[in-house]
Amino acid sequence: MAEDKTISGLQVEIKPTELRKLLQDKSKYHEGRAKLLEEQLKKLKEGGVALSAVEDDEVATVAKSSNYQAEAVLKTLQDAANTNREKAKVYAFIATHLAKKTYRLHHEDMVYLGLAQRHW
């Protein structure tokens, strides 16, 4: 009987060095986002920045969506900073624990890595 050589669904093969770099970059990005959000949060708490003058898109969106209610904005920003910091830790951990084999990524893997959206 002949061996079936078809592949079911979209799968992408990526070398561990490339995947490690991607994960390290994602970790740095999320660490930077956490720091930026925490800086904005600190300025808002100190009263040094008006919510309407915030330059960061994510911070401005949070401020507008909460109708500028200070406590809601501060909590949402802190939660966003914490989430970004946790993502940075997870990506860094995975990057340091990769096997030295080629990885086959499925759609959900690519969503997790930020390479694709969940639904198009």
Image (tube, rainbow, N blue to C red):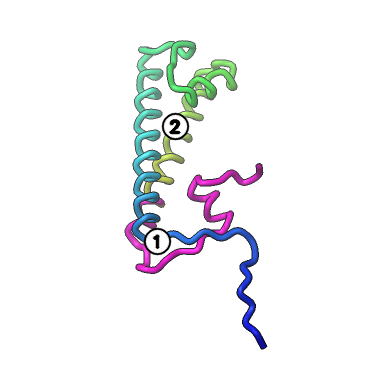
Taking the spot 60% from the left edge, 58% from the top edge, the residue there is 10
Q: Is residue 120 above or below residue 48?
A: below
Q: Residue 79 location in percent, x, y?
A: 47, 35
Q: Is residue 100 above or below residue 69?
A: below
Which quarter of the picture shows residue 81? Answer: top left
Between 109 and 83, the one nearer to me in the picture: 109
Which quarter of the picture shows residue 38? Answer: top left
* Highlighted magenta segment, given as a residue range: 91-120
Residue marked by disc 2:
78
In the image, 115: left or right of 92? right
Q: Residue 105 location in percent, x, y?
A: 52, 59
Taking the spot 55% from the left edge, 49% from the top edge, the residue there is 111
Q: Residue 1 location in percent, x, y?
A: 67, 88
Q: Secondary structure at mark 1?
A: loop
Q: Residues within 10 Å of mark 2 (few under 14, many from 20)?
A: some
Identify the mark nearer the N-term, 2 or 1: 1
The dot on residue 15 is: 1
Taking the spot 49% from the left edge, 11% from the top edge, the residue there is 52
Between 18 and 63, the one nearer to me in the picture: 18
Q: Quadrant of the C terminus?
A: top right
Between 18 and 51, the one nearer to me in the picture: 18
- What is the distance, in whole Å, between disc 2 and disc 1 at their CAs? 36 Å
Which quarter of the picture shows residue 49? Answer: top left
The dot on residue 25 is: none
Please say whether residue 50 is one of the residues in the magenta stretch: no
Q: Secondary structure at mark 2?
A: helix
Please say whether residue 106 is one of the residues in the magenta stretch: yes
Q: Residues within 10 Å of mark 1 (few under 14, many from 20)?
A: few
